Structures are given as C-alpha cells and as structure tokens.
Amino acid sequence: MAKKTRYSDAELEEFRAIINEKLEKAYRDYDLLKGAIMNTDGNDISDTSPTFKVLEEGASTLSKEEAGQLAQRQMKFIQHLQAALIRIENKTYGICRETGELIPKERLRAVPHATLSINAKEKGRR
C-alpha cells in the first residue's frame, strides 16, 4: 500500500472547522486584550482620589505592558492559524516542512497550526 502523501478533502474540512473555531476564540481574546490596553472598560483611575492615583498609575502601566505583550502573542497565534487555512486551500496542510511526511492527526488536532512533525521538531532542538 502506498504511503499517504496528503490529507483527503474531508479530513482537510475537519481541520478547517477546528482552526476556524480556534480562530474565533483567538479574535475574542485579542479584542479583550486590546480593550484592556485602551481602557475601554472604563475602569481607570480618573475618578479616584489623588492619593491612590500614583500607585494605580504604576500598576496600570505594568498591566498595560503585560496586556500589550499578550496581545502581540495572540496576534502571532492568529497569523499562524490564518496561514494554516491557506495551507488547507493549497492542499499542503499537515505536511511537515522538514521531512515532507504527514504530521499525525493527533498532533494537528492539538496544535492545528503545526508545520513540523514531532521528530523534525525534536531534531531542531539538538
């Protein structure tokens, strides 16, 4: 029996559904982080007394920096998911970019934007 070189259209549709679900959640999380950075929830320090204002501003700056870093990571994740959708369209999804072999379904279900098999990823760490 010949070795399978790509996933079937039905399998690709299953992965597309998984990716779209993760993408939807990722966008929601990104919007929440953006809201935290821009203070769209209205919980800032403008209406508190000056005594607490200095302490709050320091904590607010730190939390905005953390939210900014998280938002950057979230956007990178979104971009990886979008790239996976393009690979599905091109019918190259699930093919390891190092070995050319199919990445196991279990790995793709857990990490749908994966481009390396476990073996290739471990070889890269050495």
Image (tube, rainbow, N blue to C red):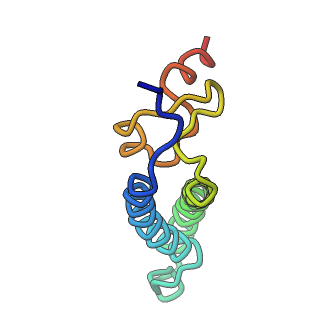
Residue at 48% x, 25% y: name it: 118
Can you tell which quarter of the image residue 37 is in?
bottom right
Q: Residue farthest to the front?
A: 1
Residue at 39% x, 57% y: name it: 10
In depth, the one of 63 and 95 nearer the eye is: 95
In depth, the one of 35 and 85 nearer the eye is: 85
Task: Say which quadrant the N terminus sits in.
Answer: top left
Left or right of residue 108, residue 97 in this image: right
Residue at 57% x, 64% y: name it: 64
The location of residue 60, given as percent across then percent down, is 54, 66
Can you tell which quarter of the image residue 34 is in?
bottom right
In depth, the one of 114 and 97 nearer the eye is: 97
Task: Say which quadrant the C terminus sits in.
Answer: top right
Residue at 50% x, 33% y: name it: 102
The location of residue 53, given as percent across then percent down, is 53, 74
The location of residue 38, given as percent across then percent down, is 59, 78
Left or right of residue 112, residue 95 in this image: right
Can you tell which quarter of the image residue 106 is in?
top left
The location of residue 14, given as percent across then percent down, is 37, 57
Q: Residue farthest to the top?
A: 126
Q: Is residue 45 above or below residue 124?
A: below
